[in-house]
Image (tube, rainbow, N blue to C red):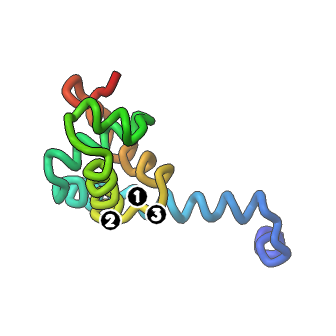
């Protein structure tokens, strides 16, 4: 019955399966840690601010850099973390655990 649902495009089941597959890809904390470890300190700061929901303009002002520079760092974060979207990046950050948003990276 479940396979029939997928074949007949039962969207709720299809979305659930897609979520499970995506989550399975990100459960390997060692892989996430390696990806996170490849980020520069500035990229980590930008990532923390991005996952906290800050706008590029706010991040730029807080870090004292240009908005275009924030965009470049943000793109590098997405590429290095292999995240296809912001929600995926947030999910990955959750997989890495708490502590990504520190006092230094918070943007008011």
Residue 3 lies left or right of residue 106; in this view the side is right
Percent coordinates x, y for residue 16 in the rendering = 67, 58
Question: Does dot 1 land on a helix, a strand or a loop?
Answer: helix
- Badge 3 vs badge 1, beta-carbon distance below 8 Å: no
Question: Does dot 3 land on a helix, a strand or a loop?
Answer: loop
Q: Earlier in the sequence, mark 1 or mark 2?
A: 1
What residue do we see at 72% from left, 65% from top? 14
What residue do we see at 33% from left, 59% from top? 75
- Badge 3 vs badge 2, beta-carbon distance below 8 Å: no
- As displayed, is residue 97 above or below residue 71? above
Give the Cα separation between the discs numbered 3 and 2. 8 Å
Circle number at residue 92: none
- As displayed, is residue 107 above or below residue 21? above
Question: Does dot 2 land on a helix, a strand or a loop?
Answer: helix
Give the Cα separation between the discs numbered 1 and 2. 15 Å
Depth order, front residue of 82/106: 106
Percent coordinates x, y for residue 21 in the rendering = 54, 65
Crowd class of label 2 (few under 14; some 14 to 19; many from 20; radius 10 Å): few
Percent coordinates x, y for residue 18 in the rendering = 61, 64
Crowd class of label 3 (few under 14; some 14 to 19; many from 20; radius 10 Å): few
- As displayed, is residue 64 above or below residue 40? above
Which quadrant is the N terminus positioned in? bottom right
- As displayed, is residue 107 above or below residue 57? above
Give the Cα separation between the discs numbered 3 and 1. 13 Å
Depth order, front residue of 60/84: 60
Residue denoted by label 3 = 84
Q: Earlier in the sequence, mark 3 or mark 2?
A: 2
Residue denoted by label 2 = 79
What residue do we see at 69% from left, 60% from top? 15
Q: Earlier in the sequence, mark 3 or mark 1?
A: 1
Residue denoted by label 1 = 26
């Amino acid at each position: 019955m479940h396979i029939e649902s997928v074949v007949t495009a039962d969207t709720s089941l299809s979305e659930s399966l897609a979520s499970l597959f995506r989550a399975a890809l990100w459960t390997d904390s060692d892989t996430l840690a390696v990806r996170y470890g490849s980020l520069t300190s500035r990229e980590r700061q930008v990532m923390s601010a991005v996952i906290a929901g800050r706008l590029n303009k706010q991040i730029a002002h807080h870090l004292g850099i240009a908005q275009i520079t924030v965009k470049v760092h943000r793109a590098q974060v997405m590429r290095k973390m292999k995240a296809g979207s912001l929600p995926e990046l947030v999910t990955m950050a959750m997989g890495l655990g708490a502590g990504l948003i520190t006092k230094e990276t918070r943007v008011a």
